């Protein structure tokens, strides 16, 4: 009898045979040949790669997987747009920014984190800033432009009766933002795990406002459209989505093992790894009308804030590989 760790790949492989015969599978570029595929996947800070290795979800894939690691979603999506990777993981806000900026990307799967992946606005532990309203006149980094940190900051400012004009915004890559918070060059930082976990556990930084009620907790697997048009690559992506969703279920059912292996793979401190693993637990979420409407609402908010370059119709930019199998 197969162990739970080995059962997932076996089931996915069986489903793959059905996929190859599926009449809805792409045929424009010829028959499906998974052995020839190297699926290039973009990750942020090693979180997804650690999850999939810990769960064994990629064991026995009939294609190869090549990982590319990035510090934030913006460079993941830039690589995706340029065709440097086939598939990438990004939150709702950066995904929407990419969809508004290019027609080269499609959303193919979704998941949701009840813990919001550690998304929060943090300040140094001895900061006199006690509420979001106290940020008036201060310098804040929402990490990169169009990120989930940017969206959280704008939402939190609005909740406090402020706007982006009431603070000084400094867009910084995560490493630079962390250094700026330490040096006092910025007064607050809107970011996500693992950066929030490091700030809290290693620096003692204080959460000024978390994402509760202000952000969706949605993340997406986004695909390059040229890759989707290739029958073999699209079939590999559909199989990867199934395995990825299985890995999410495994992590939820095996929190201690997930934390231990995440610590080993990422070399992070046990305190940071435990917090990241706890807050990164997610559930696969169908790209159904409810989620599409929710994402459209976020897009409309972001356009109202003046961040999106153009209006997008979310429903036209989705292809649910988990639902269709192709």
Image (cartoon, rainbow, N blue to C red):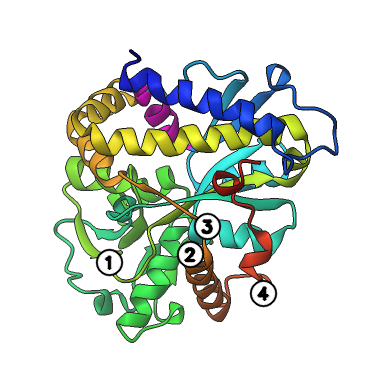
Q: Is residue 49 magenta?
A: yes
- Nearer mark to the viewer, of 2 and 1: 2
Task: Identify which residue is drawn at 63% across, 66% down.
Answer: 315
Q: Which labelled disc corresponds to residue 212?
A: 1
Where is residue 167? Give x, y as percent.
Answer: 39, 75
- Nearer mark to the viewer, of 4 and 3: 3
Where is residue 62? Give x, y as percent.
Answer: 61, 18
> Which is more N-terminal, label 1 or label 2?
1
Q: Are marks 2 and 3 in contact (CB under 8 Å)?
A: yes
| Residue farthest to the top, as pictured | 1
Give the magenta part as a residue range.
Answer: 44-55
Where is residue 30? Give x, y as percent.
Answer: 85, 30
Q: Nearer the viewer, residue 151 or 49?
A: 49
How far apart marks 4 and 1 lie (CA) works out to 26 Å
> Which is more N-terminal, label 3 or label 4?
3
Q: Are marks 1 and 3 in contact (CB under 8 Å)?
A: no
On the image, numbered disc 4 is attached to which residue? Answer: 311
- Nearer mark to the viewer, of 1 and 3: 3
Vertical placement of residue 306 versus 11, above or below = below
How far apart marks 1 and 3 lie (CA) works out to 22 Å
| Residue farthest to the bottom, as pictured | 161
On the image, numbered disc 2 is attached to which residue? Answer: 291
How far apart marks 2 and 4 lie (CA) works out to 18 Å
On the image, numbered disc 3 is attached to which residue? Answer: 287
């Amino acid at each position: 009898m197969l162990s739970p760790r080995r059962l997932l790949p076996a089931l996915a492989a069986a489903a793959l045979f059905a996929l190859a015969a599926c009449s809805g599978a792409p045929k424009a570029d010829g028959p499906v040949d998974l052995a020839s595929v190297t699926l290039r996947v973009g990750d942020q800070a090693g979180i997804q790669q650690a999850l999939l290795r810990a769960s064994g979800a990629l064991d026995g894939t009939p294609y190869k997987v090549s990982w590319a690691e990035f510090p934030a979603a913006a460079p993941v999506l830039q690589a995706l747009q340029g065709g440097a990777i086939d598939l990438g993981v990004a939150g709702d806000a950066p995904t929407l920014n990419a969809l508004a900026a290019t027609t080269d990307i499609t959303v193919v799967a979704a998941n949701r984190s009840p813990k919001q992946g550690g998304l929060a606005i943090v300040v140094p532990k001895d900061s006199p800033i006690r509420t979001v309203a106290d940020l008036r006149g201060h310098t804040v980094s929402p990490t990169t432009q169009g990120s989930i940190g940017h969206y959280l900051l704008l939402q939190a400012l609005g909740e406090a009766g402020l706007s982006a004009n009431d603070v000084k915004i400094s867009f910084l890559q995560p490493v630079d933002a962390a250094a700026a918070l330490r040096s006092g060059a910025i007064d607050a930082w809107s970011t996500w795990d693992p950066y929030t976990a490091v700030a809290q556990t290693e620096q003692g930084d204080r959460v000024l406002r978390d994402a509760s009620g202000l952000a969706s907790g949605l993340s997406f697997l986004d695909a390059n459209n040229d890759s989707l048009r290739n029958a073999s690559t699209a079939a590999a992506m559909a199989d990867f989505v199934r395995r990825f969703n299985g890995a999410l279920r495994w992590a939820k059912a095996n929190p201690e093992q997930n934390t231990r292996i995440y610590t080993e793979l990422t070399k992070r401190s046990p305190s940071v790894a435990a917090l990241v693993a706890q807050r990164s637990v997610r559930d696969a979420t169908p790209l159904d009308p409810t989620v599409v409407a929710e994402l459209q609402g976020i897009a409309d908010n972001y356009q109202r804030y003046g961040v999106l370059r153009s209006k997008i119709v979310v429903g036209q930019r989705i292809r649910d590989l988990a639902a269709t199998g192709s």
